[in-house]
Image (cartoon, rainbow, N blue to C red):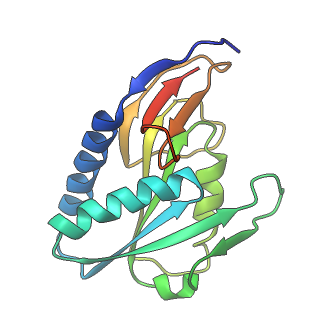
Amino acid sequence: MPDRKILILNSQQIQQKIDRIAYQVLEDNFDEEEVIIAGILPRGNHVAERLKAVLDNIAPFKTQLLSIELDKQSSQLHANTNFKVEDCANKVIILVDDVLNSGKTLAYGFGVFLDVPLKKLRTVVLVDRNHKNFPVTTDYAGMALSTVIKQHIDVVINVEGEEDAVYLM
């Protein structure tokens, strides 16, 4: 892996992407009473928190943050959430992660809601790398980036002592 980091998005650009996504979510859900923003821990949850903050300022609907902790190493779905998934029944879910690479994390994220009747489920990622192994697409992406498989995307958000940024490594 190369030693150099190439800055893809700075702090201001990250916020601009999140703002744009928030307006897209608002346009798609303007007639809803409540929208659940489901962030996949750790970095997807940071993006979800930022998205929720923007929506709280611009949207007429109520938002609630659901944090999802996944065991991505397991061959079976193991997930913990900060409130009961059943409480999401008949609501709009916006599933958020930082980077879409193979699609495995989002596929596991979908699995959390399989037994719950939803109004609709949409996906948000800050960066879509276009290397999917699973049939997963994003509804809202901050940016699509074609990379080689050996490259890595590093999202730095809410890391103490560091400015928010997205790097290609």
**Residue at position x 76%, y 68% from top?**
78
Image quadrant assignment for residue 55: bottom left
The quarter of the picture where the C terminus appears is: top right
Q: Is residue 26 above or below residue 65?
A: above
Residue 50's spot in the image, x, y percent?
36, 57
In the rendered view, would you say 123 is above or below 137? below
Q: Quadrant of residue 75?
A: bottom right
Residue beneath the point at 43% across and 53% down: 47
**Left or right relative to 144: residue 101:** right
In this orientation, which residue lies closer to the viewer: 44 or 31? 44
Residue nearest the observer in this picture, 140 or 71: 71
Image location (x, y in percent) of residue 109: 60, 61
Q: Position of residue 88 (x, y in %)?
A: 47, 82
Task: Give x and y (percent) for residue 33.
Answer: 24, 82
How many numbered marks appear? 0
- Kindly identify the residue that appears in the image at 50 percent across and 45 percent down: 98
Residue nearer the viewer, 75 or 157: 157
Residue at the far front in the pictured view? 161
Q: Quadrant of the N terminus?
A: top right
Let me know if residue 15 appears in the view: yes
Q: Is residue 29 visible?
A: no
Compared with 100, 169 (above or below) is above
157 in relation to 32, above or below: above
Determine the residue positioned at 76% across, 60% down: 71
Along the horizontal axis of the image, is 140 left or right of 68? left
